[in-house]
Amino acid sequence: MSLIPSPFSLFPFPFFVSPIKASNAAEIRQLIAALGTTDDVRREAAIARLAVIGARAVDGLLKAYTSTSDRDMRIAILRALEPLGDGRTIPIARKAISDGGDVAVAAASALRGLLDSPHGPTSAAALDTLVAATLDPTAERRLRLTAFDALQTMPEGVRARIAGALQSDPDPQLKTRASDSSRIVAAADVVWQDALEGKLPDTAAALREAAQGRAPAAALSALQKMIDAVREREGTVSSAKRLEWRTVRGALHQALALRGSRVAVYDLRESLQDARGPLPPAFLAALHVVGDQSCLEPLAAAYDRAASADPRWRSQLAAAFRAIASRERVTRRHAVVKRIAARWPEAARAFTAPE
């Protein structure tokens, strides 16, 4: 028997789950608190996890919104409400739009997810609010453009009526956007459909724009295949363009995480194994939500390779490890934990240190 003490006997394991599972209410409170962090990964992971929890999180989000005056926190809460598609979002979204600024823009985006609500009054209220914001000549241009863009998921007849109303608008940018909207939507539809069939556009930006508003409703298997295709494209482009494609792949992973899907966890794991530097934040945000035990050793290996990297990257790797270990109920006696202790003792100490 080795006389060298395991690092797991020297440090606490704050992320391991006790036999008594924390209540959903406690988890929701923790996730809502995480929305106020400046850590991009932690915030995006909280948004994705709240999306998986669903309607049970809405009351807490609404209460948090009304109890804070912090602009960034309110924006994050509105972003968390967007994928939930709950009609209770409408009153605070309307108030946020009337308040103006960045919060108003976030509120317009949040209403996008309500346009296809199966509850008729909810979808109608979202539509009316977005149309009113689009056509209001006294509103900020960026709010009007965001509201108009959100309406591009509506049927052609609705889009045409709104575009027609904007032809007499005093803002030339709104008029130009309205004139081009049908062409832009049609072009994005073609890019998206081609991508679903494995034919990617020449630029990552084109796919990123097409994915907005379309990825959330795409079949999970289609997103998985698109992730594979994007990763293959990354290997064929210059290093200058590789990050652009990788960022799109991260966004696709986040779209899967928002729906709680693990169909592409293998790509998250392999991305960690291949990483020689920080990955876009969306990768680790997705790992927080859908990563499994098979991701723990790659996280430890990536931490070990990042000895001279940005400390923030190492901290994000450690946080992802803790989140997965907690959710998967990995104990200190688990074989994967013992392997990590033997192969990457520094990572083991960092992963088990108090936050």
Image (tube, grey):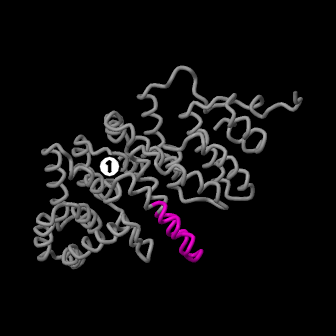
Q: Is residue 253 above or below residue 199?
A: above
Q: Check the picture and name the quadrant holding the N terminus.
A: top right
Which residue is located at x 69 percent, y 33 percent? 335
- Secondary structure of the magenta portion, mostly? helix
- Seen in the image, is 271 located left or right of residue 12? left
The residue pinned by badge 1 equals 82
Query: In this figure, what is the number of numbered marks?
Result: 1
Report if residue 72 lies within the magenta region. no
Q: Is residue 30 above or below residue 192?
A: above
Q: Is residue 39 above or below residue 55?
A: below
- Seen in the image, is 156 located left or right of residue 313? left
Q: Position of residue 104 (x, y in %)?
A: 29, 56
Q: Check the picture and name the quadrant holding the C terminus.
A: top right
- Seen in the image, is 286 located left or right of residue 13? left
- Give the magenta range: 227-248
- Seen in the image, is 106 located left or right of residue 124? right
Which residue is located at x 62 percent, y 59 percent? 278
